[in-house]
Amino acid sequence: MKVTAVLGSPIRNGNSEKMVNLFLSGFSGDDISIFNINELNCKGCQACDECQKSDSIECTLHDELQPVLNRLAISDLIVLASPMYMDQVTAQMRIFQDRLNVFLRKDFSSKLKDTPTVLIFSQAIEDMDNYKDYFKTLKKVYKKFNMNVIDTIILADAGSHNELQNDLVIQDRLKNWRTNYATYYS
Ligand SMILES: Cc1cc2nc3c(=O)[nH]c(=O)nc-3n(C[C@H](O)[C@H](O)[C@H](O)COP(=O)(O)O)c2cc1C
């Protein structure tokens, strides 16, 4: 099974990356790819609309985001992780999101197959429900591309980069995610 994780934090080994690593620990033996958007030389969508003229997923920017797009197209499970910055995902994650445009046809159908997707967030704000509406909106955005969000995992009260160790519930949820979703992935 091909699992693909996309990291949106500029911090290496911070909360959101640690969350992804714990999540992926349940997938040893699978084909895993991890992309860190902050380390890629890539730009936001230039709105050239060339991608809407064919079924190609080759973006005219031909930059380091292309391998991420290619990999998403063959993935069985997608994991998208970002800290919250200014009440949104990071600028790095926004670049990634806009570039998903390559998967949209002119009639707004998606070139991607239905792909289960898990969202992972870390935030300073203590209230886990603080961004509930925003996360719901993101779920709708990803649905346009056939990325079907089946779970959203939030580390709250995490104002720096090393708070995952304080949250045993979230640690447990991440570690055992695959087992708990066994019906999807048997
Ligand atoms: C520029 C900036 C903006 C931030 N804005 C928010 C915010 O709006 N809401 C929030 O809950 N946390 C905010 N934070 C805190 C981060 O989301 C939090 O520290 C997160 O756990 C960092 O994850 P990381 O270690 O994976 O980078 C912000 C941090 C930075 C650096």
Image (spheres, rainbow, N blue to C red):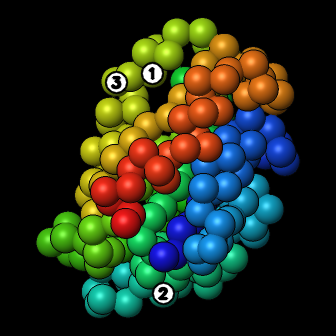
Residue receiving disc 2: 58
Going by the numbered disc 3, the residue's amino acid type is Asp
Picture quadrant of residue 38: bottom right
In the image, taking residue 118 as reference, residue 23 lies left or right, namely right
The residue carrying mark 3 has its beta carbon less than 8 Å from ligand 1? no
- Disc 1 and disc 3: Cα gap in Å? 6 Å
- Tell me residue 106's x, y (percent): 21, 75
Instruction: Say the numbered circle drawn on residue 131.
Output: 1
- Disc 3 and disc 2: Cα gap in Å? 33 Å
* Mark nearer the viewer, 3 or 2: 3
Residue receiving disc 3: 133
- Tell me residue 164's x, y (percent): 73, 28
Whether residue 181 can be seen here: yes
Residue 102 position (above or below residue 23): below
Question: Is 43 in front, or is 15?
Answer: 15
* Mark nearer the viewer, 2 or 1: 1
Q: Residue at x 54, y 35 (%)?
A: 173
Seen from this angle, which residue lies furthest left?
Answer: 107
The residue carrying mark 1 has its beta carbon less than 8 Å from ligand 1? yes
Disc 1, SS: loop
The answer to whether mark 1 and mark 3 are in CB contact below 8 A is yes
Q: Determine crowd level at label 2: few under 14, some 14-19, many 20+ residues with C-alpha closer than 10 A.
A: some
- Tell me residue 117's x, y (percent): 41, 55
Picture quadrant of residue 184: bottom left
Q: Residue at x 71, y 51 (%)?
A: 21
